[in-house]
Amino acid sequence: MKRFYSLFPLALLLCMWPLSKAAAADESDTVYVVRSTYEVDLFPRAMISSMEETDDGLVIRTDDGSKFSYKPDQYLYCDRPLQLASLSIESFKFNNKFNHQVYSDIDCEIVGDSLIRGVVPAIGHWLTPSFKIEDKQVEVMLDDTVRLVSKRSRVPMYDEHTLTVSDPKVRVLTPRRVRPAQYVYELKPVSRSYRLLLDWPADRATEAPRIDIHIENDEFVSNKVYYLNATISMDGAGVFPSMDETPVQIKGRGNSSWRNERFSKNPYRLKFEEKVKPFGLHGGKSWVLLANRQSGSMTTNAIGMYAAGIVGTDGANHIVPVDLYINDYYWGSYNLTEKVGFANNSIDLDDESKACLLELDTYYDEKYKFRTRYYSLPINIKEPDFSVAGSTEITQKDIENRMNAFARAVYKQEEFEHLVDIESMARYFMVTELIINYELMHPKSTFIYHENVLEDTCKFKWGPIWDLDYSFGYEQEHSYFQDGADDVFWTEVVGKSNMESPNTIKRMRIGSPALDRAMYKTWTIFMRDHLEELIDYCDDYYAFARPTLEHNREMMFWSDYDYYDYDWVTENAKVWLRQRAIEAYAQLTPYELTDEELGIETPDEGYIPFDGIAQPKAMASTEPTLFDVYDMRGMQMKSKATFQNLRDGLRPGLYIVNGKKMLIK
């Protein structure tokens, strides 16, 4: 199959050569040598002192004294003009589908032929860029250290970077300065550089976002049953979109977090008449204000839900820290987040008519509820609402049958991947294990949903992750990020009197070989791609939320006073998360994972960099194999290492060597 490419801009290529020689060059002044591997070497004639082609092969000598030789079986032909691939970036963006902390797509502007710029209104600096280039074989490098793969690479980004587009199959004779007026020529891949400038409004913010609620007749929320009419306005602090005064309804929410006191830092539920996008989040009618009342807890939901988002748990929530004012009284520091449910801003389904959302919850306090036949698990039916005529095509019995089949498989120690989405369950369990959220063991606030209860091939999914203020060591020690990092999560809690179902959850975890493998895969990808990101997010979130965290100390509700220094909490969180991840990962059963499972791309060995050649050939060579070594985050550790020095200077661990994973001991 023929390939067609735009002509490579020679002026760009020549910018790497001495000006005096580049000035006189044009397309016809370049010698193209097509090697038998279908790679191309480019020699500007201005740099060539002699070129001779005989039965013994091709010899090109340059004016610096260098000699480049090709045996007859090492090249196909030379001195013919070719059309090579373009090195242009056609578009560059950050798609919210691949960036949990980006609430809407960010299209960057390409200015001229060497500048890309954009504004990133987000908390957290790790991003997955999406970009379009003319040919997939062209490589894009970030700051000459990390190869970017569109929609897949996860990298830290800040104010300014360099994007280098190169074709590894095409080399050009390039001068390297060895003395002020002396150059040595060498063949290097052709490349083109862009300056990437990103503006981060969150880094400049001096105040946190603010929410003002004015309740009709200056009432205060005193219960979790009745909504009160109110108006709401939001100030995005120059980072997120603001909201003008808008009608809203407000009532209390929560279980142990709720107090029937007029002046108390309670959590609230907000309900709008129409879908709204507060601070640019995805549109929805129902939202929640989390109070984070417990001392030291005001970063727990942010960190845990960010972990859920980057791992890819279903329905992961977003967190925006805000200063809340009610009837012009300062009410404290809160988190705005989505209300869990079937809605565009939470669990977004194309068809809800046959779906159900269930909560495993010992409070067992919903109108529609049941206990499973095996294990007697308490199940609240959150969706659908059977009292609304015509809202669903399923019955409570249909839901009970589905859930009982799953509980029976767990009880009988049978495989259950035909009933439960194993990948979804693995992601949920992995995050739960990481943050030590024992709510799963009670169980409380544990959500699963089924998109079509009447369809046998449809499976339960796990999520969203919710209610994290008893995580990170708090359940057992009543402190955050200080104890419990070495817990063996699935076994150490068995038999504790305050948990209703630890044995049931343990059997779910260890009873399925498919889940065990999926857990190891999910953890491995997290350790490679996301652990450092989560630790960096702790700093980024604290830097942005600091004004509201400090303002919270001034709140009127002294019974809810949070005395913690969140600078200290954040430092503890980073140390604790790293230790926790290492300990939990070490406890797993290791599996030999495939490149496909790990998301490692296999290079296209059949790539031809120009039009006119049908099939590649193998090139005979006695040169030693060289190795490029990357860590599990994609950072290049070594370039062109030999087998003898491959391991030198590397810590024990898992690495990617020439596209394959390798354990170095």
Image (cartoon, rainbow, N blue to C red):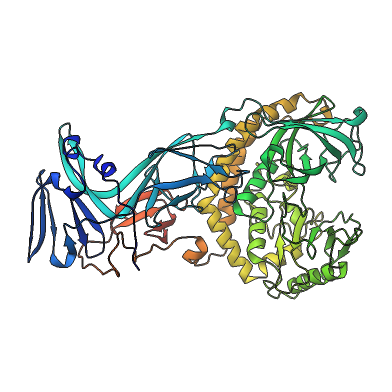
User: Nearest the camera: 101 or 364?
Assistant: 101
Q: Does 645 appear above or below 229? A: below
Percent x, y of residue 13: 26, 44
Could you tell me which quadrant the C terminus lies in?
Answer: bottom left
Evaluate whether residue 71 shows in this view.
yes
**What percent of the width, then of the height, locates residue 97?**
59, 51
Question: Which of the image's four quarters has the N terminus?
Answer: bottom left
Residue sitting nearer the eye, 270 or 379: 270
Residue 649 seen in the figure: no
Q: Is residue 449 above or below residue 190?
A: below
Please state if 188 lies on the left or on the right of 46 as rendered: right
Q: Which quarter of the picture shows residue 403?
A: bottom right
> Would residue 37 appear left or right of 143 to someone viewing this image?
left
Q: Is residue 263 left or right of residue 76?
A: right
Residue in view at x 49 percent, y 67 percent: 592
- Between 240 and 398, the one lying in front of the other is 240
Please give the name of the residue rendered at 63% of the width and 57% of the height, measured from the top-left corner.
Answer: 430
Residue 594 appears at what percent x and percent y? 48, 67
Q: Is residue 200 left or right of residue 85?
A: right
Q: How many marks?
A: 0
Quadrant of residue 220 within the rendered picture: top right
Foreground residue among 407 and 380: 380
| Residue 409 x/y as whole percent | 74, 74
The part of the image, by quadrant, that contains residue 215 is top right
Task: Name the residue located 60 percent from the left edge and 62 percent from the top edge.
Answer: 519
